[in-house]
Amino acid sequence: MENLNIALLLMVVGMATVFAILLIVIYLGKGLIALVNKYAPEESVPAKSAGANAPAPVPANIMAAIAAAVSVVTHDKGKVTKVEKL
């Protein structure tokens, strides 16, 4: 019975230690994130004008192939409304 008590005590101490270390890691991580955001904020990217870099239109044959693929996959229940080149 004494061995069982020692084992349970060891288990509780080990789990409490792991829990405490994980809490320390979490709060140090949050603190580091706050420091980085305060002293080195993310640079903002200027928005591109829509007229200068307008995407090229999708060719008709490629649009027809996309529409046919969507039709086959969705059993004529799906519909292509917009296609953009990324």
Image (cartoon, rainbow, N blue to C red):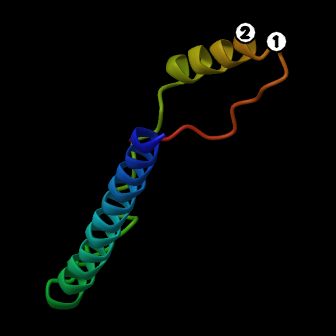
Kindly tell me whether residue 85 is visible in this rendering.
Answer: no
Kindly tell me whether residue 61 is visible in this rendering.
Answer: yes
Few, some or many residues within 10 Å of mark 1 (<14, 14–19, 20+): few
Q: Quick check: 38 above or below 17?
A: below
Q: Quadrant of the C terminus?
A: top left
Few, some or many residues within 10 Å of mark 2 (<14, 14–19, 20+): few
Q: Which residue is mark 1?
A: 75
Q: Residue at x 35, y 50 (%)?
A: 10
Q: Is residue 78 left or right of residue 29?
A: right
As drawn, the residue found furthest toward the right would be: 77
Q: Residue at x 21, y 83 (%)?
A: 41
Q: Position of residue 12 (x, y in %)?
A: 42, 55
Q: Are marks 2 and 1 in contact (CB under 8 Å)?
A: yes
Q: Position of residue 76 (x, y in %)?
A: 83, 16
Q: Quick check: 75 above or below 44?
A: above
Q: Position of residue 59 (x, y in %)?
A: 48, 26
